[in-house]
Image: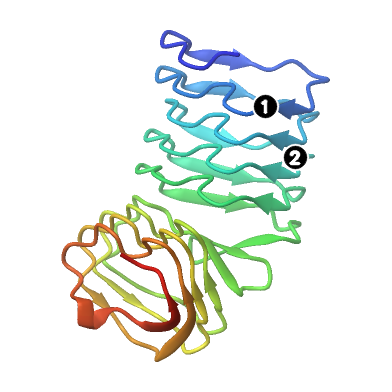
């Protein structure tokens, strides 16, 4: 509906709207602010992708965020997640290079933040690492079994990631374009390594890559 509206800066979505549909504000590069009412239950695939939105406060009542909904929002610095959100599909925040802070309501039963990083509530899946976090080393906590799609994609400062013994799966594009990543400890053979999981990691030597039954990285 508003895809590619280059001069659009502010949007106030009216009440009674329950869904922000697919690609609604895709490519609105000047869009900085969007007020989303509590009536909204879902945000569709690519809805705000490649827009200029700077902060995201999701409304209480929202249930799901679609694939790539906020992908390549390069000005997005803060995300606030209410207790109602249950589903964040893959790549929802891929390419958000300015993301520094993720907040999750304590009442959320599906997601939580550990040391500034977004995890599933049970701690088994790492969902999203803030791209602009300036730490050069990160140790994924023991008990984590899955690194989700794009979880570390385009992290500009990470040089070393310590994988836990509990890890079984690394998702598609998990470390895509981590240009400074040079060290990744091996935990033995994993069940799965996703498509292009380590693509565009020019400093990561091949011998540092973990082994897996299904080896799909390039």
Identify the residue under disc 2: 62
Earlier-in-chain disc, 1 versus 2: 1
Determine the image quadrant of residue 80.
top right
Determine the image quadrant of residue 45.
top right
The residue furthest top is 7
In the image, residue 89 above or below residue 148: above
Q: Residues within 10 Å of mark 1 (few under 14, many from 20)?
A: some
Please give left or right for residue 132 compared with residue 44 in the image.
left
Which of the numbered marks, if any, corresponds to residue 21?
1
SS under mark 1: loop
Please give left or right for residue 63 compared with residue 144 in the image.
right
Closest to the camera, between mark 1 and mark 2, is: 1
SS under mark 2: loop
Please give left or right for residue 134 compared with residue 79 in the image.
left
> Residue at 48% of width from left, 32% of height from top?
49
Query: Quick check: marks 1 and 2 in contact, CB under 8 Å?
Result: no
In percent of width and height, residue 15 lies at 79, 19
> Residue at 62% of width from left, 73% of height from top?
123
Distance of label 1 from label 2 (alpha carbons): 14 Å
In percent of width and height, residue 65 lies at 65, 42
Q: Quadrant of the C terminus?
A: bottom left
Q: Residues within 10 Å of mark 2 (few under 14, many from 20)?
A: many
In percent of width and height, residue 68 lies at 52, 41
In the image, residue 205 above or below residue 91: below
Determine the image quadrant of residue 211.
bottom left
In the image, residue 205 above or below residue 203: below
């Amino acid at each position: 509906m508003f895809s590619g509206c280059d001069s659009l800066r502010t949007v106030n979505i009216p009440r009674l709207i329950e869904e922000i549909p697919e690609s609604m504000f895709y490519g609105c590069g000047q869009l900085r602010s969007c007020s989303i009412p509590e009536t909204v239950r879902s945000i569709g695939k690519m809805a705000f992708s490649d827009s200029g939105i700077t902060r995201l406060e999701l409304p209480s009542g929202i249930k799901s965020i679609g694939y790539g909904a906020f992908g390549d929002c390069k000005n997005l610095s803060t995300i606030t997640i209410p207790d109602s959100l249950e589903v964040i599909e893959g790549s929802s925040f891929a390419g958000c290079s300015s993301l520094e802070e993720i907040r999750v309501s304590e009442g959320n039963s599906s997601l939580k933040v550990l040391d500034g990083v977004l995890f599933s509530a049970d701690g088994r899946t790492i969902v999203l690492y803030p791209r602009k976090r300036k730490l050069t080393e990160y140790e994924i906590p023991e008990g984590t079994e899955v690194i989700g799609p794009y979880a570390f994609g385009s992290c500009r400062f990470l040089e070393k990631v310590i994988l836990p013994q509990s890890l079984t799966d690394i998702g598609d594009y998990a470390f895509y374009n981590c240009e400074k990543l040079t060290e990744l400890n091996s935990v033995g053979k994993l069940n799965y390594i996703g498509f292009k999981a380590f693509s565009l990691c020019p400093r990561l030597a091949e011998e540092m890559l973990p082994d897996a039954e299904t080896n799909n990285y390039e």
